[in-house]
């Protein structure tokens, strides 16, 4: 409706202006004639008309271009999408609807632009704190689901957390300076996949994908899989003021060795509950060279897998009451306790589901088996009734009550092939990604539909995307307040959408307009980086980020003045003992103070660098030849790096940010003299 109107307007206006154009040359030739500016407008529009014609743009394409075009220097983006960088281990920030990549935030992997793990000790220490094994450096991670902190179930724009599927870790990003502040290793897990915040960010909850023998770190053969391997849901206690995970206050719920995959928080009516989709209830373990079926075959034998229904408020009470066991130093509510005490229930779901999503009102839980063209909608109310009346089918092998499918099901909506994830617009519609169909299905949520005469629980529209969509993301979809308007389609394959640039193809994002009855693609963004599995999208005005650090000498890790931060005039080189040299250095356009460091072979250097600039955007770098030292220092920031000087020689350093007209001159020398000849010794 709105689209049609806009299209009409665009074409109508162009039609009128084409007429104006006919008079434009005469108007501009008339001495002092015509309204000021009119010929220019007409000429510009004339050009626009010609461009449209020459490029053969359709009215839809013109509309899409006009709706997404960001005016230079204007803050036209209404939303920021925080996209996961997949196994590139970072987070991308993309503006909507312009689809411009505005920032990358390094998290698990190194980033030399921001000096993340390529220089500053602060960044290295944050990453080291989360190592899987303390003695084995992890230089990357697989970041899938960036989640934004919430207050009363709504985004508050303060923190972003995301788990690492490959390392069983999670990370905290501060949205004041968009930097990673903490990485922790989840206890008792090999991998973390799903994650969400509880409604006031009290906990950041993660689910394991791969079950593992407990206590973690012990060996058990795969034939003891059923007996010894376990999944875990971890409740990481989060201090939402300090923005830190407190591992000592965190606890876990032990689960059967199914693959727990993804999790969603109950909201409003269902606050205090959570939901997990699981696959491999067959407990297959593969063995392709050992005469056993491949995982994919073994794990898709059963017609139904399980949605896990967990009463986490109850679990929290049990934890507080001490009904836990200490495993690997963490309080764990054992599986038998969770099953017996009414914490854990199962509901059957079509086989091999991927994703579980709760409607914004908390009333319905959506889950789809990838091999069934329907989404199954469970009613929270019905689940509660089934639990209260012990309406169980049976218990599973581990004593967990299985609720009757028919007693919990509210709807079974046919959508298309390969349904995965569902998002919500807050207007009464769900949007489900169809991996095999390469499409998005829009469907009405019964009882919440806005249009009279519409059938409840029904497919309303289908849009082809390019290609093989995984997640999709609508602003605020995982909160109690979705914002609607746009939907991002995060596609796994791009195949023929872009010119071939070698066999590795870009990932393809598509921006979809969901403001009308029919979904429309507005923009395609190829990302030449790892797979962005998922995104969280927040209104732009909710982000209140800093422009510079508040005072000179600031340490982003503590968000306080660093004891090593200095001002101009306080620079010094101190030889603290025979081989230890401490340097306090400043940077300002366009010099380093000091700019000569005189060292001896075998010295150990502790370098504190402060960027004393107060100007916005006046970031400086420090790249030192041959020593794997590359720093990025924002205005006001102090960073520290320690390194050994093992080889005599001359090592220049320079600023890596083209910061001024004399940036090329912003350099320094590290001079390393040979060790004195140790004559007579030995
Ligand atoms: S996962 Cu990748 S498409 Cu890790 Cu949420 Cu579904
Ligand atoms: Cu500082 Cu270039």
Image (cartoon, grey):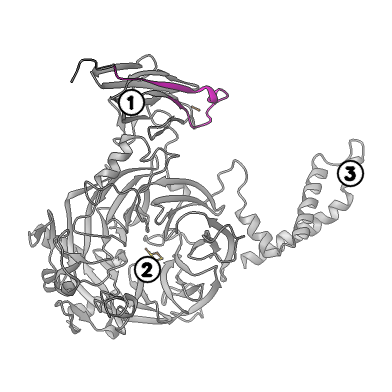
Is residue 448 visible to the viewer in this orientation of the structure? yes
Alpha carbon separation for disc pair 3 and 2: 59 Å
Query: Residue 563, percent across and down?
Result: 27, 25
Image: magenta residue range: 651-676
Is residue 485 visible to the viewer in this orientation of the structure? no
- Disc on res. 27: 3
Is residue 349 found left or right of 186 in the rendered image? right
> CB of mark 2 within 8 Å of CB of mark 1?
no
Q: Secondary structure at mark 2?
A: loop
Callout 3: CB less than 8 Å from ligand 2 = no
Does the magenta-highlighted stretch encompass residue 668?
Answer: yes
Q: Secondary structure at mark 3?
A: helix
Alpha carbon separation for disc pair 2 and 1: 52 Å
Does the magenta-highlighted stretch encompass residue 133?
Answer: no
Closest to the observer, 135 or 411? 135
The crowd level at tag 2 (other Cα within 10 Å; few <14, some 14-19, many 20+) is many
Query: Residue 364, percent across and down?
Result: 34, 73
Residue lying at 40% horizontally and 59% vertically, measured from the top left: 481
Residue that numbered label 1 is attached to: 607
Upstream in the sequence, badge 1 or badge 3?
3
Query: Residue 110, percent across and down?
Result: 38, 44
Q: Secondary structure at mark 1?
A: strand
Upstream in the sequence, badge 3 or badge 2?
3
Alpha carbon separation for disc pair 1 and 3: 67 Å
Residue that numbered label 2 is attached to: 359
């Amino acid at each position: 409706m709105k689209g049609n109107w806009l299209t009409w307007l665009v074409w109508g206006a162009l039609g009128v202006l084409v007429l104006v154009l006919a008079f434009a040359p005469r108007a501009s030739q008339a001495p002092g004639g015509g309204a000021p500016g009119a010929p220019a407008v007409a000429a510009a529009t004339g050009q626009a008309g010609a461009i449209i014609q020459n490029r053969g743009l359709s009215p839809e394409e013109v509309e899409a271009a006009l709706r997404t075009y960001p005016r230079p220097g204007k803050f036209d983006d209404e939303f920021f999408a925080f996209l996961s960088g997949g196994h590139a281990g970072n987070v991308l920030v993309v503006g909507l609807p312009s689809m411009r990549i505005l920032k990358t935030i390094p998290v698990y992997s190194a980033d030399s632009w921001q000096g993340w793990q390529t220089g500053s000790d602060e960044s290295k220490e944050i990453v080291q704190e989360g190592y899987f094994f303390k003695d084995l450096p992890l230089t990357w991670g697989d970041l899938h689901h960036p989640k934004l902190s919430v207050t009363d179930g709504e985004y508050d724009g303060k923190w972003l957390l995301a788990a690492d599927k490959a390392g069983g870790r999670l990370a905290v990003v501060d949205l004041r300076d968009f930097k990673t502040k903490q990485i922790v290793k989840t206890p008792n897990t090999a991998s973390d996949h799903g994650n969400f915040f509880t409604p006031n960010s009290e906990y950041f909850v993660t689910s394991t994908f791969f079950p593992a023998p407990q206590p973690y770190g012990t060996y058990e053969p795969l034939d003891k899989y059923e007996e010894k391997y376990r999944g875990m849901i971890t409740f990481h206690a989060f201090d939402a003021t300090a923005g830190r995970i407190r591992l000592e206050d965190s606890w876990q719920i032990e689960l059967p060795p199914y693959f727990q995959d993804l999790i969603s928080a109950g909201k409003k009516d269902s606050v205090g509950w959570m939901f997990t989709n699981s696959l491999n209830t067959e407990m297959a373990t593969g063995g392709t060279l050992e005469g056993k079926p491949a995982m994919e075959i073994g794990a898709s034998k059963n017609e139904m897998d399980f949605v896990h229904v967990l009463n986490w408020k109850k679990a929290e009470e049990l934890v507080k009451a001490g009904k836990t066991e200490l495993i690997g130093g963490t309080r764990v509510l054992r599986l038998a306790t969770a099953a017996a005490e009414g914490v854990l229930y199962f509901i059957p779901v079509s086989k091999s589901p991927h994703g579980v999503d709760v409607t914004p009102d908390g009333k319905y839980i959506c889950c789809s088996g990838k091999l069934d063209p329907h989404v199954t909608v469970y009613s929270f109310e019905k689940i509660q009734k089934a639990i209260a009346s012990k309406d169980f089918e049976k218990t599973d092998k581990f004593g967990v009550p299985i609720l009757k499918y028919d007693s919990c099901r509210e709807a079974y909506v046919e959508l298309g092939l390969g349904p995965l994830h569902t998002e919500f617009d807050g207007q009464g519609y769900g949007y489900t990604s169809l991996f095999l169909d390469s499409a998005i299905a829009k469907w009405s949520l019964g009882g919440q539909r806005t249009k009279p005469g519409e059938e409840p629980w029904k497919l309303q529209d289908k849009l082809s995307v390019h290609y093989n969509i995984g997640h999709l993301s609508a602003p605020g979809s995982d909160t109690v307040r979705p914002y609607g308007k746009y939907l991002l389609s995060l596609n796994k394959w791009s195949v023929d959408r872009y010119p071939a640039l070698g066999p590795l193809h870009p990932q393809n994002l598509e921006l979809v307009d969901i403001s009308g009855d029919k979904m429309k693609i507005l923009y395609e963004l190829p990302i030449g980086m790892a797979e962005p599995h998922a995104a969280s999208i927040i209104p732009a005005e909710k982000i209140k980020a800093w422009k510079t650090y508040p005072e000179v000498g600031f340490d982003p890790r503590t968000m306080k003045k660093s004891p090593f931060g200095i001002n101009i005039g306080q620079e010094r080189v101190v030889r603290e003992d025979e081989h230890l040299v401490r340097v306090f250095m400043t940077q300002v356009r366009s010099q380093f103070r000091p700019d000569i460091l005189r060292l001896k072979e075998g010295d150990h250097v502790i370098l504190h660098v402060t960027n004393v600039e107060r100007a916005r955007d006046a970031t400086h770098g420090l790249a030192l030849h041959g020593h794997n030292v590359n720093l990025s220092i924002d205005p006001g920031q102090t960073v520290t790096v320690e390194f050994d000087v093992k080889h005599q020689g001359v090592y220049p350093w320079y600023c890596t940010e083209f910061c001024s007209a004399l940036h090329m001159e912003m350099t320094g020398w590290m001079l390393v003299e040979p060790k004195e000849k140790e004559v007579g010794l030995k």
